[in-house]
Amino acid sequence: MPSINRRRLLQGVSASLLVAPLAAEAQPAGKIARIGILAVGTTADLGGPRPQRPAISAFLGTLRELGYVYGEHFVTEARGDEGRPERHASLAAEMVRLRVDVIVASGQILAALKQATSTIPVVMAGAGDPVGDGLVRSLGRPGGNFTGLSLQSLETTTKRLELLKEVVPGATAVGVLWDRSSPSTWQIAEAAARQRGWKLLPLEIRDGAIEGAFKKATAAHAGAVLVAAPSLAAHPRRVAELVARSRLPAMYGARPYVDAGGLMSYSADLYDIYRRSASFVDKILKGAKPADLPVEQPSKFELVINLKTAKALGLTIPQSVLVRADQIIE
């Protein structure tokens, strides 16, 4: 027994010796970095060393793997918009006042950060169209204080439509929920439908009012809907419930909608995006400039299908689609 304890002690010492140099390299002695985190939804599940939000947990997990210890080498200043996009500007301004060392954010909040600061490094944990939205000059040479990862959401719009039409081939018209924050989404969807001879129904969302859009879809006898409005990301459950009430099969651009009861989604793997964002933060804390760090494209995409929802809709998912699913919720 003593020999076993001694072996465990030596293993623990060896592990600490391996981790210590990594952490020391990450931050100057005595310096505790402050990492700002801005996200949609509630603040309650974003903060601390063990956040409830899976994506943020994945981000912190990678930082731990890189040798960072929460409270010793870094802390987070996390804020959620509480489902109110109108708060983005004030949240961005708050991060600037806090003088954090780097900010991690995604989606529409990035536009507010672009207006709020040109000096604090910002790591995009998924931007729909970073060049088109004016966040960076180019993917290879960002040229400012923004870098990180693109979601390739525009490129995947066509793929989402194709999957939706494969699941609901009899849909004479597909409603597309979009908003002015990402007009390119509707343009790409319309171009793809024109090439394939599909009929689309534009359903523009204004000021978060989505009930009217679904009434319009029902009145126009839409057979399915593509949810592609970034402004709805803060309300996945509410959107999924409205879709369920309208009895329309729907394709979403992010997994949280399916976890909330939506039918299916196809998107970049958000957890992988946040894990990779940690590497950008690591480089920036070690002295790298965002302008010199090329924006990366997602390497993993996932198709998630909710069979319980399909059953409630009386819908049979084709085997050709099921075999391509990365996760099936039953």
Image (cartoon, grey):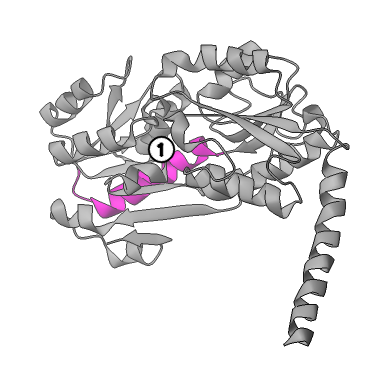
Left or right: residue 23 compared with residue 240: right
**Residue 114 shown left or right of residue 225 in the figure:** right
Residue 15 spot, x, y in % from top left = 79, 65
Q: Quadrant of residue 100?
A: top right
- Where residue 68 appears, as percent x and y from the top left, is 74, 46
Quadrant location of residue 210? top left
- Give the amino acid type for the residue marked by disc 1 in the picture: Ala
Q: Secondary structure at mark 1?
A: helix
Magenta residues (range): 151-171
Q: Is residue 164 magenta?
A: yes
Q: Main secondary structure of the magenta part?
A: helix
| Residue depicted at x 41% and y 54% | 303
- Taking 118 as reference, is 329 above or below it? below
Quick check: is 269 in the magenta stretch? no
Residue 199 at least partly seen? no
Q: Of residues 115 and 78, which is closer to you in this image?
A: 78
What residue did someone put label 1 on?
Answer: 192
Q: Residue at x 14, y 36 (%)?
A: 246
**Alpha-carbon neighbours of circle 1 within 10 Å: few (<14), some, or many (≥20)?**
some
The residue located at (68%, 14%) in the rendering is 117
Please state which of residues 251 and 282 is positioned toward the viewer in this rendering.
282
Q: Position of residue 196 (x, y in %)?
A: 35, 42
- Residue at left 86%, top 60%? 17
